[in-house]
Image (spheres, rainbow, N blue to C red):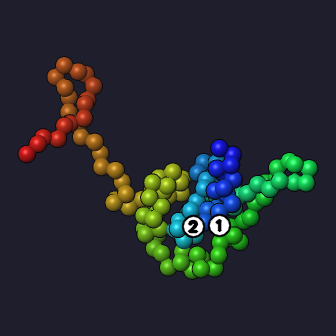
Amino acid sequence: MCRVFAAVCASDSVQTCRLVGGKITFVHRRLWPALVRLANRLPKGALTAVREEHTERGSHRTVEVPFPAWVPKQIRSAGRRLSETTAVAHLGNLASALPGLEPDRPDALRKPPVRTERHPRRKQPVPMRRRKS
């Protein structure tokens, strides 16, 4: 498993940061413009790039690169061109895991409520079955 993580971290298309709950999160390059656009709505430090290096003594050292220093110029300009709604849509399900984005999610991304009905012999509501037409 360690080799898989090392291979993912070595990729130029993936950035690691403490985006979701302060835990290491792998973010693919195609999501970077959306994160750039929404950076002001995310917790401070959430977009700091984190990577591990091996020292000469064989121990590990964490290296952090602050946002936006790690973001390429093209990605920054692409992020500025996005609207907030489009940026949230690009993040998809990741947006619901980010604390700064949940309240303003567009209606298109919200899950519809599950309709329930009471079963005559059960006290708990059960999901309704779709009727075939």
Q: Amino acid at mark 2?
A: Arg
* Residue at the spot 47% in from the left edge and 68% down from the top edge: 87
Q: Residues within 10 Å of mark 1 (few under 14, many from 20)?
A: few
In the picture as drawn, the residue positioned furthest to the top comes out as 121
Q: Nearer the viewer, mark 2 or mark 1?
A: 1
| Residue 7 x %, y % | 66, 55
| Residue 94 x %, y % | 49, 55
Quadrant in the rendering for residue 49: bottom right
| Residue 36 x %, y % | 58, 70
Please state if 65 lies on the left or on the right of 35 as rendered: right
In the rendering, which numbered label is found on residue 29?
2
Q: Is residue 42 visible?
A: no
Check if mark 2's residue and mark 1's residue have beta carbons within 8 Å: yes
Q: Is residue 110 above or below residue 36?
A: above
* Residue at the spot 80% in from the left edge and 56% down from the top edge: 53
* Residue at the spot 25% in from the left edge and 30% down from the top edge: 126
Query: How far is disc 2 from disc 1 in space, using C-alphas?
Result: 8 Å
Q: Is residue 51 visible?
A: yes
Q: Secondary structure at mark 1?
A: loop
In the picture, the quarter occupied by the N terminus is top right
Q: Residues within 10 Å of mark 2 (few under 14, many from 20)?
A: some
Q: Secondary structure at mark 2?
A: helix
In the picture as drawn, the residue positioned furthest to the left comes out as 133
Which residue has dot 1 on it?
A: 12
